[in-house]
Amino acid sequence: MACACHDGGQPFVDLSRHMHMTTTPALPSLVLRGSSATARFEDGLDYVQWEQGGRVTRIPLDAIETARGLDRSFEVVLTTAEADRPPAVYAVHDAGAAAVTAFVAALEARLPEGAAEGPRVDGEELITEVPAGHPPRPSKRNLVVAVIAVFAVIDVTVAVLREPAWAIALPFLQIFACAGAFMALTLGRGLYDALRLPKHGITVMAELDHYTDKTKVYRYVDQDGELHFYRESTGGQQLELSYDPCNPSRASARQSLYGQVMMALMAVVGLGMACGGLGFTGYQIFLALRR
């Protein structure tokens, strides 16, 4: 510990370095979600985890030339071994502007300073892919587009062959059916996980990681040491949840009997809405095609 003296000759302790070391806050663990990609950066890790198109890759900090953000877009520019070759860029689009700013600041604080001398590394060669525990799912966006296209064809057909007014009435009924289907699928899956995972999965105590404007985000580690996140509006600093060992990212918090009953009732209501709306739509196209 360094010592110095002021004009009066009395020694004093220089704590500037010590204070700088003890007051430097730890960097937060951040998740940046966009329309087609998700980036994760954890305090203490030397890589950025990138999830896109069903693939999970790790981008080491040594492979990153720079990180930049513009409004709601975030980009990671990789290093190149050849100066005349354009660098590879990983991008997250349609994320929150504040989240982009925080992510760029946290990443820039950890990026190593570029070496003035020595050969440059090729960032793409340093990237590693994390084996997926389950096959990638079809894009939700493609599914939504396909459903809208089918409904549009049905509505136009019914309007042309029967009554033009159905072109306005049927879409409202179909929106009602889609809302019911979403309720049934979401709550049904949640109830299935709440009943199955505590018996056949692995139960852990997840730690509160951070808050968002809508919910709390908890983190937990699976048997292979991989980090996962779980969103839950209720809970304290810890949350008991069970995850699927074959798909650790699929988890369920512990549900009371009352919660399970309410989920079942709402799932049945949603199923009734979906069946009613889709059944009426099918009946109308059947009558139109019979004419």
Image (cartoon, rainbow, N blue to C red):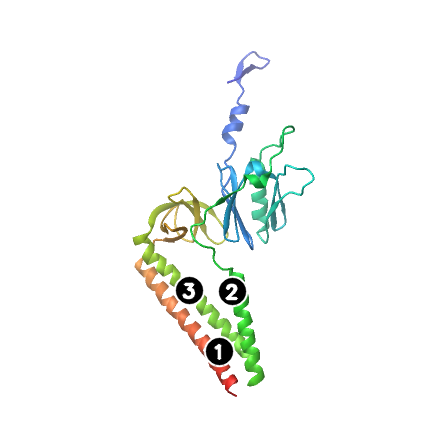
Point out the tag, 1 or 2, that comes first from the N-terminus: 2
Mark seen at residue 223: none
Q: In the shown orientation, is residue 92 left or right of residue 238?
A: right
CA neighbours of label 1 inside 10 A, class few (<14), some (14 to 19), many (20+): many
Tell me if label 1 and label 2 are in contact, CB under 8 Å: no
What secondary structure is found at the residue carrying circle 1?
Answer: helix
Q: Type of residue at label 3?
A: Leu
Q: Nearer the viewer, residue 149 or 33?
A: 149
Residue 217, above or below 10:
below
Q: For the point 51% across and 31% down, which residue is it?
A: 23
Q: Which residue is mark 1?
A: 281
Q: For the point 59% across and 42% down, which residue is it?
A: 104
Point out the tag, 2 or 3, that comes first from the N-terminus: 2
Q: Nearer the viewer, mark 2 or mark 3?
A: 2
Q: Which residue is mark 3?
A: 185
Q: For the point 52% across and 27% down, which residue is it?
A: 19
Q: Type of residue at label 1?
A: Thr
Measured as percent of width and height from the top left, residue 183 is found at: 43, 65
What secondary structure is found at the residue carrying circle 3?
Answer: helix
Q: In the shown orientation, is residue 92 left or right of residue 249?
A: right
Q: Type of residue at label 2?
A: Leu
The residues tagged by marks 1 and 3 sit, at their Cα atoms, a distance apart of 20 Å
What secondary structure is found at the residue carrying circle 2?
Answer: helix
Mark seen at residue 143: 2
The residues tagged by marks 2 and 3 sit, at their Cα atoms, a distance apart of 14 Å
Measured as percent of width and height from the top left, residue 252 is found at: 37, 54
